[in-house]
Amino acid sequence: MQQWRKTTSSMVGAIALSLGVVGLSAIPAHGGLHFEESHHEHNEAKDGHEEDIEIQVIPANAEAGIYMLLGQGGNIGVLVGEDGVFMIDDQFAPLTEAIQTAIAELGNKEIRFVLNTHWHFDHTGGNENLGNQGVLIVAHDNVRERMSTEQVLASIGMEFPASPEAALPALTFSDRATFYLNDQTVNAIHVEPAHTDGDTIIQFAEANVLHLGDTYFNGFYPFIDFESGGSLDGMIAATEQGLALANDETVIIPGHGPISNRAELESYHQLLLEVREVTQSAIDAGLSLDTFIQSQPLADYDEYWGSGFLSPEQFMTIVYNGLNP
């Protein structure tokens, strides 16, 4: 089973906040982020508490057999039907059995494909289990490349060893891939570097459902992994691609947060545009990181977007450092 480790005892990473972290607070540090950790371990699913995690099934388009699964980590998407199950991301290894049970209750337990939206551990942690069961794992070329070697994310104080062979995508693509099953055309579309350099968004064409992976965090500030090739410009472009694929009836599964729609995605897009404008303006004006943070540049957005995955200070520190390396 794949393991990971923190590079310092005092830093827990921004990604880990999506895994049910309790009691983290950010302290502005010179040149970066510093986190104080409570006594709770950053990944409860790795600590023997996976039996306490309920897998929730939320219909995206039940008539078409498309659902969003919530557990711990990134949102899972599934297409269930007579041709088998097409699955998007797989959270953590200790949750695989519970996830499979939830899928089987939807009418078909045969998982044929798992598509990873990117390489991060909260989206690929179940790969090894499923790969060993013969499930075909699919992802962008860069996902396999990153999972094949050690990854160090200094900005969040975590490092990840190379994944075992069974966890690696066995089929990769450079631009897009199309799957035909259960009366759906499933388009997997690589976007330019956004959350990482290996992001894929997925369109269930006939059902009018999108899964946007971690290019979309619904309801809270997103994590942009600049160290994995991500970029704010790419996040904006990926969101614009999602908007172009959507209409007022489209159901959108985000990488994190509740199930969504085009209007909410447009609000997120406007947030990202504002973030880019205020941050770049501050950098161009020569403002230091501390001065920029103290100015509370996103005060008008913080009440809605700043109470979840990242605090405003954490988010703006990551963005400032990413745009001003």
Image: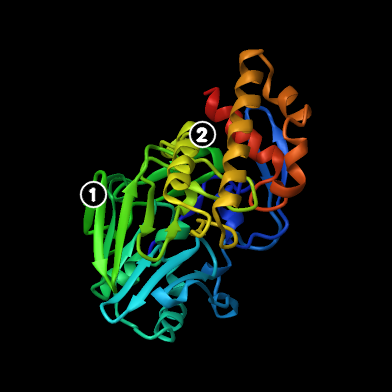
Choose between 91 and 64: the one closer to the eye: 64
Contact? badges 2 and 1 (CB < 8 Å): no
Q: Secondary structure at mark 1?
A: strand
Q: Residue at x 46, y 81 (%)?
A: 102
Q: Which mark is residue 25?
A: none
- In the picture, measured across the screen, residue 309 lies left or right of residue 65, that is right
- Quadrant position of residue 117: bottom left
Q: Position of residue 301 (x, y in %)?
A: 73, 41
Q: Residue at x 72, y 51 (%)?
A: 307
Question: Given the current orientation, which residue lies at the most extreme front position?
Answer: 248
Q: Position of residue 314 (x, y in %)?
A: 66, 40
Of label 2 and label 1, which has the lower sequence position?
A: 1
Q: Which mark is residue 173?
A: 1
> Relative to residue 229, is residue 58 depicted above or below?
below
Q: Position of residue 168 (x, y in %)?
A: 28, 58
Considering the image in quadrants, where does the N terminus appear? Answer: bottom left
Crowd around label 2: few <14 · some 14–19 · many ≥20 (10 Å)? many
Q: Which residue is mark 2?
A: 232
Q: Residue at x 70, y 45 (%)?
A: 311
- In the picture, measured across the screen, residue 130 lies left or right of residue 257, that is left
Q: Residue at x 54, y 66 (%)?
A: 72
Give the amino acid at mark 2.
Leu
Crowd around label 1: few <14 · some 14–19 · many ≥20 (10 Å)? some
- State how many labels appear: 2
CA gap, disc 2 to disc 1?
23 Å
Q: Position of residue 246 (x, y in %)?
A: 46, 52
Give the amino acid at mark 1.
Phe
> Relative to residue 49, is residue 239 depicted above or below?
above
